[in-house]
Amino acid sequence: MPAGFQSTLLLTVLLAIGLVFFLRAASKDRTTVVDVSSPKPPLEVLETLTQWLEKRGWSRIGGDAERQVLRFRGQVAASRPLAVLLSVLAAIGGACFGLVLQQLNPQWHGWPLLLIGLGPVAGLVYDKRAARIEDLELRLLEDVDTTLTTGSYLRLRAHRDELIAIELELSESLELASDGSLLSSPI
């Protein structure tokens, strides 16, 4: 086997491995916990958050009065553009791998090019893994900072993207304050 084919085969296999890891990362659970505070009363903050979540399709599934917890559940949809992109990338990768296999073993004729069919499979795998039911939990904390006597302290546990949306859309109206780590993280 010529050295050119070996290096092309190696690079193609590495690209396939990269696609598999990208599929895993795209559908990975990114549940995060963040503590936020607001100078507004707890009932106002919880009511505003509840209304905002219900507008976004979350439904209240209960809570625990003793622990001061509210729980919500929502269906998270997969990104259609990302599913199409992954399908196209997998189809191109399958075609490349098929061409390499065809060059390495010419008596297979065009059969290796059927690996193009892996494209839609990658999109379906992403679609099935990324579309899932997510939970969101709001917990009212006791006064952490004694300098604020009328404020609210919440611990939010949810998908990272939902926490970022809360911080971006409700930070002004509720005067939410957190450590800002969600908006500064590159991931």
Image (cartoon, grey):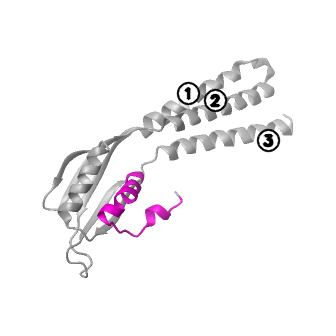
Specify the quadrant that holds the N terminus: top right
Magenta span contains residue 181: yes
Q: Which residue is mark 2?
A: 91
Dot 2 and dot 1 residues touching (CB under 8 Å):
yes
Spatial CA span between label 3 and label 1? 27 Å
Which disc number belongs to residue 7?
3
Span of residues in magenta: 161-186
Please report whichever mark, 2 or 1, sits nearer to the chain's N-terminal start. 2
Please identify the residue farthest to the front as the structure is shown: 173
In the drawing, does residue 129 fall left or right of residue 14? Answer: left
User: Which quadrant would residue 145 be assigned to in this image?
Assistant: bottom left
Q: Position of residue 34 (x, y in %)?
A: 35, 63
- Read off the residue under disc 1: 120
Q: Residues within 10 Å of mark 1 (few under 14, many from 20)?
A: some
Q: Nearer the viewer, mark 3 or mark 1?
A: 1
Q: Secondary structure at mark 1?
A: helix
Q: Quadrant of residue 111?
A: top right
Please tell me whether residue 185 is drawn above or below residue 144 in the rendered image. above
Q: Position of residue 51 (x, y in %)?
A: 24, 50
Q: Was residue 9 drawn as part of the magenta stretch in this picture?
A: no
- Position above or below: 13 against 94: below
Amino acid beneath label 3: Ser
99 vs 17, left or right, is right
Q: Between residues 155 and 110, which one lies in front from this camera angle?
A: 155
Badge 2 amino acid: Ala
Q: Residues within 10 Å of mark 2 (few under 14, many from 20)?
A: many
Residue 91: image location, x then y, percent: 64, 29
**Residue at left 42%, top 52%?**
161
Q: Indicate the position of residue 85 as horizontal and vertical percent values.
A: 58, 36
Which residue is painted at 13% across and 61% down in the image?
Answer: 66
User: Which is more N-terminal, label 2 or label 3?
Assistant: 3
